[in-house]
């Protein structure tokens, strides 16, 4: 812990919790681009801190893979599935 954390005390309530998140325009743009080239893999997130990042793409219907990097981060690849 830094000393700044130890000597700072503010009496106040935490912000109101916001339930759920609105889809990111940037994320929606990526998914739209993936849809335009079905079954083609693309690197969508470079050096993510967690492989859990795959979940946001799966929820939107993408196939997703994560690859662990030498530095411990994750590269996230996604593709839109080919139409059946």
Image: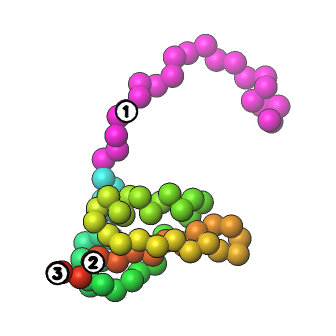
Labelled disc at residue 18 = 1
Asked if residue 33 shows in the view, the reply is no
Whole-percent x and y of residue 52?
50, 57
- Quadrant of the frame with the N terminus: top right
Question: Image height check: is 13 above or below 56?
Answer: above
Quadrant in which residue 3 is drawn? top right
Figure label count? 3
Quadrant in which residue 79 is drawn? bottom left
Question: Image height check: is 8 above or below 21?
Answer: above
Query: Please, what secondary structure does the residue beneath circle 1 have?
Result: loop
CA gap, disc 3 and disc 1: 38 Å
- Residue at screen point 17% across, 81% down: 84
Q: Which mark is in front, 1 or 2? A: 2
Q: Residues within 10 Å of mark 1 (few under 14, many from 20)?
A: few
Q: Which residue is mark 3?
A: 84
Instruction: Please report whichever mark, 1 or 2, sits nearer to the chain's N-terminal start.
Output: 1
Q: Looking at the magenta stretch, what is its main secondary structure? A: loop
Query: Please, what secondary structure does the residue beneath circle 2 have?
Result: loop
Quadrant in which residue 27 is drawn? bottom left
The answer to whether residue 31 is left or right of residue 6 is left
Q: Which residue is mark 2?
A: 81
From which residue to which does the magenta span run? 1-22
Q: Residues within 10 Å of mark 3 (few under 14, many from 20)?
A: few
Instruction: Please report whichever mark, 3 or 1, sits nearer to the chain's N-terminal start.
Output: 1
Q: Is 83 contained in the magenta span?
A: no
CA gap, disc 1 and disc 2: 32 Å
Question: Image height check: is 69 above or below 3?
Answer: below
- Residue at screen point 51% across, 22% down: 14
The answer to whether residue 5 is left or right of residue 41 is right
């Amino acid at each position: 812990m830094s000393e700044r954390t130890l000597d700072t005390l503010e009496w106040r309530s935490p912000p109101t919790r916001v339930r759920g998140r609105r889809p990111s325009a940037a994320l929606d743009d990526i998914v739209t681009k993936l849809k335009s080239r079905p079954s083609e893999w693309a690197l969508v997130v470079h050096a993510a801190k967690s492989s859990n990042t795959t979940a946001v793409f799966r929820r939107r219907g993408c196939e997703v893979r994560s690859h662990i990097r030498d530095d411990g981060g994750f590269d996230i690849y996604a593709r839109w599935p080919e139409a059946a």
